[in-house]
Image (cartoon, rainbow, N blue to C red):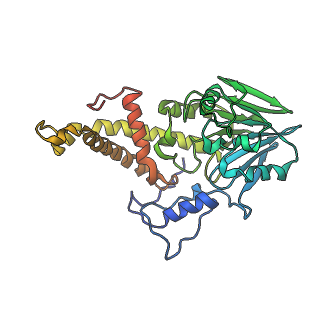
């Protein structure tokens, strides 16, 4: 991987990172810093975090290849695929409630016949039923079961489901829906469009950026880690992660896998290095006559914060300035990984249950 690191260290580089982050979220293009810009404690975003500018109409729609399009307002991404008789939509974020139908209308007057859910979360599929009430809804069996419990008419329960793999052949177009196992949440799937050499996998890999807080709030951390390998087993060239300002490539997924592997390695090192009983001694919780002895959560919070910070410093030494917002949420990623190592892997014996 090309080394794009800069010379700053953690929390030493002050500037307009917060302003640039907001600009990237809204317009997906960096704004020049002004003298009176709000100063934050976070580092500026590296060039690789930015994608194409969003037009004045408020959204960008572009063809990737062979009738597959992406639509974004700079924060969320959806896709649609034109076929002989209509359109297949993949995800329907509320932030694109107006833009997605408008973008489709720019390309074709054909109706939306099918809607594929990446997973259940409302920020990605929350207006599917509002926008496309006459469509056939497709998703993983886990997604269908969860949405049946939610009983949300804005997210109709899929009537076409699968457990492992489903090949859709609709109007001369092919989409492979693949379940790599639980990751971001149970039922979060790969949407693989072979003719366009494009993989759409939501909420795990964010091209040019670190993941969202706590490894994108992963419901299954080991499954999320393993799913990177499953994704890279597919021969895609274009990658879409459902968020932020640009499409990605195989290299972006490889970089994301490397980052997560580094978080895992650093978390193991931190668990082995931070002395729990030294923290106990400093806080004074060994005295059962001290009323504060009963506040064990304070002890555990102090210990786990120390472990997370130890791991985050290791990770940031490599990744700060390489991926966008590395200094914002890397410690939360280490926290999620540390809990997974302790609870899921049962790999470290420590006093915290």
* Residue in the foreground of this view, choosing between 290 and 106: 290
- The answer to whether any part of residue 235 appears in the image is no
The x and y percentages for residue 310 are: 33, 45
Residue in the image at 12% along x and 38% along y: 287
Residue in the image at 26% along x and 31% along y: 351
Q: 125 left or right of 284?
A: right
* Residue in the foreground of this view, choosing between 141 and 22: 141
In which quadrant is the C terminus drawn? top left
Residue in the image at 74% along x and 50% along y: 100
Check the image and report above or below for 186 versus 111.
Answer: above
* Residue in the foreground of this view, choosing between 221 and 145: 145
The x and y percentages for residue 228 are: 56, 35
State the image quarter where residue 52 is shown: bottom right
The x and y percentages for residue 292 are: 18, 42
Q: 223 left or right of 51?
A: left
Check the image and report above or below for 335 versus 344.
Answer: below
């Amino acid at each position: 991987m090309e080394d794009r690191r800069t010379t700053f260290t953690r929390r030493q580089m002050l500037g307009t990172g917060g302003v640039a982050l907001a600009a990237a979220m809204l317009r997906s293009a960096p704004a020049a810093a002004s003298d009176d810009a709000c100063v934050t404690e976070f580092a500026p975003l590296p060039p690789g975090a930015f994608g194409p500018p969003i037009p004045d109409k408020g959204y960008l729609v572009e063809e990737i290849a062979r009738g597959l399009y992406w639509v974004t307002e700079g924060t969320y991404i959806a896709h649609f695929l034109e076929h002989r008789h209509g359109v297949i939509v993949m995800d329907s974020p509320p932030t694109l409630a107006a833009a997605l139908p408008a973008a489709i209308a720019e390309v074709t007057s054909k109706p939306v016949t099918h809607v594929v859910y990446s997973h259940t979360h409302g920020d990605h599929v929350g207006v599917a039923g509002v926008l496309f009430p006459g469509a056939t809804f497709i998703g993983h069996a886990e997604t269908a079961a969860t949405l049946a419990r939610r009983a949300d008419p804005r997210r109709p329960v899929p009537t076409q489901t699968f457990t492992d793999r489903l090949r859709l052949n609709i109007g001369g177009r092919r989409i492979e829906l693949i379940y790599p196992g639980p990751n971001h949440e149970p039922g979060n799937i790969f949407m693989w469009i072979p003719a366009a050499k494009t993989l759409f996998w939501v909420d795990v890999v964010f091209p040019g950026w670190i993941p969202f807080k706590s490894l994108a709030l992963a419901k299954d951390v080991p499954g999320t880690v393993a799913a990177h390998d499953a994704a890279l087993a597919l021969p895609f060239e274009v990658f879409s992660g459902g968020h932020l300002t640009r499409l990605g490539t195989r290299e972006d997924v490889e970089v994301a896998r490397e980052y997560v592997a580094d978080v895992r390695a650093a978390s193991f090192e931190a668990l082995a290095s931070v002395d729990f009983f030294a923290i106990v001694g400093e806080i004074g919780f060994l005295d059962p006559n001290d009323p504060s002895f009963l506040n064990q959560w304070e002890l555990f919070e102090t210990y786990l914060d120390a472990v997370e910070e130890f791991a985050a410093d290791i990770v940031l030494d490599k990744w700060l300035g390489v991926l966008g917002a590395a200094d914002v949420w890397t410690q939360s990623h280490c926290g999620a990984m540390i809990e997974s190592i302790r609870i899921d892997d049962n790999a470290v014996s420590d006093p915290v249950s």
